Image (spheres, grey):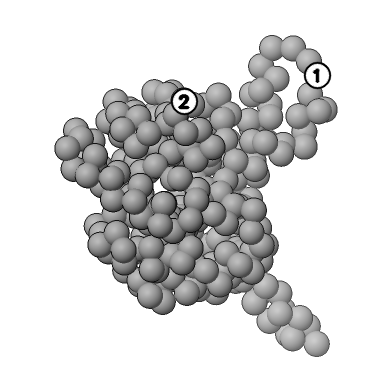
């Protein structure tokens, strides 16, 4: 893995916190991780600086209390309320109940509130609790154009909130938009580096095979993290200046 001083240069320069939500067996250190209760562990807690316990919208058996219990047990910094992955009215009802549960729970960290469209209206209907993070849900399979327009619109309505993109990988269009408008998002999560490691099929079978794929996943994370810093645009500017000078 990259030496800490060089990784720190990228994390310090990044416009967003890039959370790894895939399971790599806690083989690599990454500053930001997100796991649902059924995958979370002390090993993952110790392999990062900022740990988010996520809800699992595809598993109705995982409740807000389950997430908060896990977050308290593992000393996580952030816990997501239950994401029902439905319409706005169902989301508002679930979030209001989740906030009541959190008020009486021993977890005392930051809450992540998963919203559904229309996001600003959803946020207003739950009382505009600006001391928490909010997440833009329901766009995991959306185009980057849709994600960007939604994030910018919500940022314009709520400029002081920490806004998270659920399942948003930093693909080129989104990464460029983040560099152009850093305020539009504060964090996002994705599992792509672990799930789509092309080297996996080329590793000789045997023990510690996953360590090799984890190392390549770490390289992908570093590459993607760089894309949400100013460095790519700075390099392009240097190239343009060099071309003009050469002429």
Residue 97, position in %: x, y? 28, 45
State whether residue 28 is above or below residue 87. Answer: above
Q: CA distance from mark 1 to mark 2?
A: 30 Å
Residue matched to label 2: 38
SS under mark 2: loop
Q: Residue at x 57, y 68 (%)?
A: 148
Viewer-closest of 238 and 209: 209
Q: Residue at x 64, y 41 (%)?
A: 193
Residue extending furthest toward the left: 104
Res 220 seen here: yes
Q: Can you say which quadrant of the picture contains the C terminus?
A: bottom right
Viewer-closest of 59 and 8: 59
Q: What label does residue 204 carry, if any? A: 1
Q: Can you say which quadrant of the picture contains the N terminus?
A: top right
User: First in sequence: mark 1 or mark 2?
Assistant: 2
Residue 157, position in %: x, y? 38, 75
Q: Residues within 10 Å of mark 2 (few under 14, many from 20)?
A: some
Residue 171, position in %: x, y? 66, 58
């Amino acid at each position: 893995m990259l030496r800490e001083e060089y990784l720190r240069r990228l994390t310090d320069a990044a416009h967003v916190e890039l959370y790894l939500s895939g399971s790599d067996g806690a083989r690599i250190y990454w500053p930001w991780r997100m796991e649902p209760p059924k995958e979370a562990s002390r090993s993952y807690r110790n392999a990062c600086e900022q740990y988010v316990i996520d809800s699992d919208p595809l598993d109705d058996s995982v409740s807000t209390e389950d997430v908060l219990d896990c977050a308290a047990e593992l000393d996580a910094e952030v816990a997501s309320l239950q994401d029902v992955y439905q319409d706005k009215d169902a989301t508002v009802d679930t979030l209001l109940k989740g906030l009541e549960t959190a008020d009486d729970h021993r977890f005392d960290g930051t809450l992540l509130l998963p919203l559904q469209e229309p996001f600003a209206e959803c946020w207003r209907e739950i009382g505009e609790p600006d001391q928490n993070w909010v997440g833009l849900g329901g766009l995991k399979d959306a185009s980057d154009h849709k994600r960007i327009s939604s994030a910018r619109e919500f940022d314009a309505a709520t400029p002081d909130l920490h806004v998270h993109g659920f399942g948003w990988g930093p693909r080129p269009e989104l990464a460029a938009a983040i560099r152009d408008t850093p305020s539009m998002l504060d964090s996002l999560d994705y599992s792509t580096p672990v799930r789509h490691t092309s080297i996996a099929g080329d590793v000789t079978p045997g023990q510690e095979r996953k360590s090799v794929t984890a190392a390549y996943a770490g390289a992908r994370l570093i590459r993607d993290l760089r894309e949400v810093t100013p460095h790519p645009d700075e390099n392009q500017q240097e190239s343009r200046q060099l071309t003009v000078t050469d002429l």
